[in-house]
Structures are given as C-alpha cells and as structure tokens.
C-alpha cells in the first residue's frame, strides 16, 4: 500500500475542497477502496474520510411520498428498516443478498453506488486494463470471460458492474444527489455508470471533487410493493457477486399488469434496463409467454464478449423467473436465502422458459 495523507473533514464544504485536490479519494465504508489499495490497484495521494459528515446518515420520508436515503446510511440498517423494507421489498432483498453480514454493517449507500466496475484483470496490476490504466488494453478479452459482459460492452472493457443494490434502484428510477465544487445536482441512477465505447472503458459520471450525498426513490416506486422480487444467480449462496441478477416489479389490478419495471445485473457495466421491454407488459395478463417475450426484448442485441454465450440464456431465463415470482406476490416474510433463484418451499411452478 502506498503512503497517503488522511483527512477527516467535519463539514461538506471542507470535504469537497479536500476531495477536489489531485489524487484524492473519498472513504466511506471502505469495503471496496481499502481492498483495492491493499493490492496496489488504487493509490490515492489523499484519503478523505467522510464518515463523520453531519446529515448524511438518515432515512427520510418526504412530503411528496418520495424516500430520501443519506449516503452514509449502512446497508444493513437500510435493509432492516421495517418501513423501508415494506415499501421497497426488492431493494431490501438485494441488500441482504450482497456480501456478508459484517460487510453489510460497514458498507454505506454512497460507497455501494461508487463500487468500481471490475473483473479479476482489473484487480491484477500486472494485467492490461483500460479502466485501471487507460490505453493499456483489455487483458480480459481472450482470457477467462465466463462472467463478463454480454451487452453494452466494447473492446475497451468487458467487465460488469457488481452491485446488487443498484439493480432494483435502476428499475425504480432512483435519483442520485451529488455535491461538488460547482454546487449540487441530481442525476438519474441510470446515468451514473457510463458504458464503455470505442474510445473509453467507461466509468462514473462524476466530476473531480464531486461527492454522492444521498439518493431519492420517487413517490411512485412504493406502488410496486405488492408484486416485487429480486433474484440472484451466483456460484455460491453467500459472499459472491452475481453471475446474473434480476429485479422485477409489477402493479397488478384485476389480473392485468398496469405497470412493470425490470432490470438485470451482472450483464453489463451498469444495471441493464430497457423501458420498451417493460412497456410490452403493460395491459397484459401475467403469464410465462408474455414474461419470456419481455425478457428477450430486454436482452435484444446481446452478444458474447468471450466464452460466455450461455450467460445470455441465463439472463433471459432469470428475468422471466423474476417476473413470475413478482407476479405471485411479494413474500410476507423475507425468504431464508434472500434473492435465491430457488424457492424457500418446493413448488411445481414449472419455470422452464427457454432462450
């Protein structure tokens, strides 16, 4: 680990001034930044500890029906807030499926949103990586690619965004609150993570010195509480990033879908959502054929970035299954294995949709 200066500001203005200096990095829970520093991937000249900043650790219900979450709210506190979990059950399910209990106690909302889009090659300083060192190439291409991106990727980068939390937030149209040297601004979460293109590996849509201060869920987001699920396909049942994950939310009245939200994780450099796929569900009855068609539309244009064509099939199947589970209704009690693709009790639903 490199030598660095450590600053613990006591005000937001002081934090922004420190964070705007060259080579500075903000520290919240540290569950991502410190790991990357230990292996030499991140080498900040100054670490700006924002954990003591006032006013960033509350969950607020706003007058218009929206919910605001401060950037320093811990993942575990948010997931176990009964009012929040009742209003946004898929978000709570996603939070409880991520990492371990110890890490959820340390991780904060802002840091989760700021997780690096990364793969094993990014975390190896000896490997070429355009995200870590622009212009050096992408060692992942032609390498071990089973869990890499299958949509929205370029030759600059084929890594996937690892967050569980961000997937249902993207589906619900969350808005990120940002403060920086030029003042404050709001940014739809769909615009926070930038996809790679022909010239760039992608990254975060934040300017130097900018800091995430909170996040808002719009008033209509709680309207999906009755039919809402998050599913996660992973290689082991705990402490693993998703191979593919899916958030599905429906508003159903008299057996008809009035509105739908659908997003995938683990397939691209950002949570993947297509409003046109959701629009296909509006005004239809919740059935497997309709769900499968929406899942195919969500993944339209997907292509392997290596030896991972099977991931496209997995993504379609998981999106279909998440919609089916959502249509059955939000469980009254959180499943024993939150976000598991397997039901807590054996069923005969017959989730066998093909690609």
Image: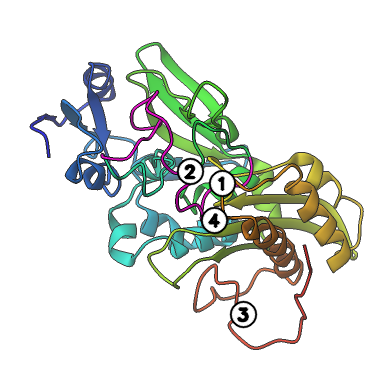
Within 10 Å of the Cα at label 1, are there few (<14), some (14-19), or many (20+) other Cα atoms? many
Asked if residue 321 is positioned above or below residue 105 in the image, the reply reads below
- Circle number at residue 48: none
Q: Nearer the viewer, residue 155 or 263?
A: 155
Dot 2: few (<14), some (14–19), or many (≥20) neighbours within 10 Å? Answer: many
**Element on which disc 1 rests:** loop
For marks 4 and 1, the one nearer the N-term is 4
Which residue was labeled with disc 1? Answer: 149
Q: Classify residue 104 by image quadrant.
A: bottom left
Q: Residues within 10 Å of mark 4 (few under 14, many from 20)?
A: many
Residue contact at pointers 2 and 1, CB within 8 angstroms: yes
Q: Residue 287 in the image: state x and y as whole percent.
A: 86, 67
Tags 3 and 2 in contact by the CB under 8 Å rule?
Answer: no
> How far, Cα to Cα, is label 4 from label 2?
23 Å
Which residue is the extreme one toward the front?
A: 142
Q: CA distance from mark 2 to mark 1?
A: 6 Å
Q: Nearer the viewer, residue 307 or 269?
A: 307
Badge 2 element: loop
């Amino acid at each position: 680990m490199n030598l660095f200066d450590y600053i613990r500001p006591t005000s937001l203005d002081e934090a922004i001034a420190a964070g705007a200096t060259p080579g500075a990095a903000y520290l919240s829970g540290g569950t991502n930044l410190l790991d990357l520093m230990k292996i030499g991937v991140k080498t900040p000249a100054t670490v700006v500890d924002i954990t003591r900043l006032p006013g960033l650790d509350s969950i607020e219900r706003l007058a218009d029906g929206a919910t605001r979450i401060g950037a320093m709210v811990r993942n575990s506190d948010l997931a176990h807030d009964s009012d929040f979990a009742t209003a946004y059950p898929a978000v709570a399910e996603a939070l409880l499926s991520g990492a371990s209990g110890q890490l959820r106690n340390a991780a904060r909302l802002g840091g989760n949103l700021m997780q690096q889009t990364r793969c094993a090659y990014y975390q190896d300083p000896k490997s070429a990586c355009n995200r870590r060192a622009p212009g050096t190439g992408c060692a992942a291409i032609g390498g071990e690619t089973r869990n890499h991106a299958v949509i929205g990727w370029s030759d600059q980068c084929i890594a996937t965004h690892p967050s569980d939390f961000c997937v249902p937030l993207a589906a619900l149209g969350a808005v990120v609150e940002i403060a920086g040297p030029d003042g404050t601004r709001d940014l739809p979460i769909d615009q926070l993570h930038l996809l790679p293109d022909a010239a760039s590996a992608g990254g975060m849509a934040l300017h130097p010195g900018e800091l995430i201060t909170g996040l808002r869920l719009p008033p209509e987001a709680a309207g999906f509480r009755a039919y809402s699920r998050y599913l996660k396909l992973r290689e082991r049942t705990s402490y693993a990033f998703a191979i593919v994950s899916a958030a599905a939310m429906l508003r159903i009245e008299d057996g008809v879908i009035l509105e739908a939200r659908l997003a995938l994780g683990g397939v691209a450099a950002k949570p993947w959502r297509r409003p046109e796929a959701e629009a296909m569900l509006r005004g239809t009855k919740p059935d497997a054929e309709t769900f499968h068609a929406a899942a195919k539309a969500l993944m339209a244009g997907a292509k392997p970035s290596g030896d991972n064509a099977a991931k496209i099939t997995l993504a379609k199947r998981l999106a279909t299954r998440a919609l089916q589970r959502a249509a059955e209704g939000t469980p009254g009690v959180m499943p024993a294995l939150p976000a598991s693709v397997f039901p807590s009790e054996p069923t005969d639903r017959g989730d066998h949709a093909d690609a």
